[in-house]
Image: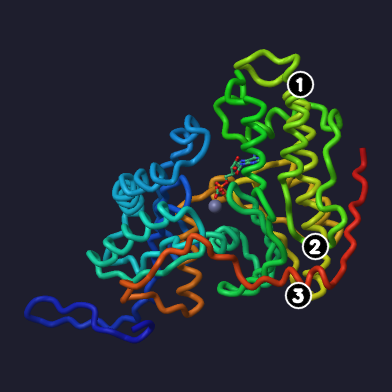
Amino acid sequence: MQGRPRILESVGRLTATRLLYATPRVTRVLGIESSCDDTGAAVVDDCGNTLGDAIFSQGHIHRDTGGIVPPTAGKLHSEQLPRVVNEALRKSRTSLQDISAIAVTVGPGLALCLKSGLSFAKDFALKTSKPLVPIHHMEAHALTARMIHKIQFPFLVLLVSGGHTLLAIAHSVNEFSRLGSTLDDAVGEAFDKVSRMLRLHCHSEVGHLAGGPAIEELAKRGNADAFKMPLVLQQRRDCDFSFSGLKNAVRRVVIDEEKSSTPHEPVARCEDIAASFQKAAVRHLVKRTHRAILYCRDVEPDARTLVVSGGVASNSYLREELSIVARQFKFDVVCPPPRLCTDNGIMIAWNGVEKLKSGYNPIFDFTDLEYKPRWPLGKDISARVIQANIKATLTKRKQ
Ligand code: KG4
Ligand code: ZN
């Protein structure tokens, strides 16, 4: 019972009874993430403090196979989860008694990876008599920023990762409207594929980086106007994305540049190609976000924040370009720090905390709880965006 006087101690023969007002119980949630190639766990409290976290990234293992092999990824999650969860709990110095619930990602994501996480969480919850809070991975990405900044609902969110690219309005912890999403590749996937086409893993300076960061780093030294890239979905007044056309344009340039390239080395003029691709991809993201801001202003006039999250949100060029547009409409751009933008257990634990605070009843009888590899975020209102027929013209950047 919270806030009620309670008898705290009775000592020796003389029973000393002290009536104290018990402090309200602090909510602490253990979060478990395993939807893709990161095994993450964390303990977070209701003030947004990370008490302990641990992560095992499989990226280096899948890099050699040129992409994630789901059975391998699922097996690695099962192997790593006990260690990662124990490490997060140990670092948090929290006894299991003080954990209110276990939040676990149940979708969307790779089926075999979600399966490993959920089956571990169920076993662990049974052993420790804890309830579960099923978490939507993208909702967790969207709400991470609220852990650090005081962001009020409603707000606009752009999620850009290796598996997703979407724009949504967050109305509350449990209510989202999806304005648009990608029709083909996710933007992070496009960065990764372009990096592979350019053979950046052979690059002496950026070879150790993942695809996206390697492109960003190399683009700093290139001429972004060196190669003409197509304007994407130019005729459509929606908030959907597409990256396959850009990827194909890069492929054509690479085929051309291969003539003057050395085998097993990065493709000739890779700096210029990286810069041209990045500029075009960011222009596309910014244009769609511009339209989303205009739409959001109409339907949710109180919205004043654009949250950008997911792995690609670490890209400084994207952040800068988004800020220019957001500023025009007096929107603040908030990006969680890079370590919270990529997949981790903290965002899952925090989402569990937010759900509990919003009145969600955690599940004690979770035998029938299933993972959902395909689980769209919120309500699809993309048709309404098209109906609004909003022209978004980007203002020219001062040179
Ligand atoms: O959110 P995330 O860690 O994992 C999921 O996809 O769920 O995002 C990883 C993606 C990768 O495709 C990676 O190349 C991309 O984010 N990424 C970047 C940057 N940092 C990470 N893309 C562009 N620029 C970056 N600086
Ligand atoms: Zn993610």
Q: Is residue 348 left or right of residue 300?
A: left
Placement of 36 over or under 130, stated as above or below: above
Q: Secondary structure at mark 2?
A: loop
Residue corresponding to mark 3 = 300
Q: How many marks?
A: 3
**Residue at 89%, 52% in the rendered image:** 394
**From the viewer's perspective, is the residue at label 2 or at label 1 nearer?**
1
**Label at residue 257:** 1
Residue corresponding to mark 2 = 238
Q: Is residue 237 left or right of residue 302?
A: right
> Residue 265 location in percent, x, y?
63, 17
Q: Secondary structure at mark 3?
A: loop
Dot 3 or dot 2, earlier in sequence: 2
**Label at residue 396:** none
**Distance Cα–Cα, label 3 vs label 1:** 48 Å
> Residue 314 location in percent, x, y?
64, 44
Mark 2 crowd level (few <14, some 14–19, many ≥20, 10 Å Cα): many
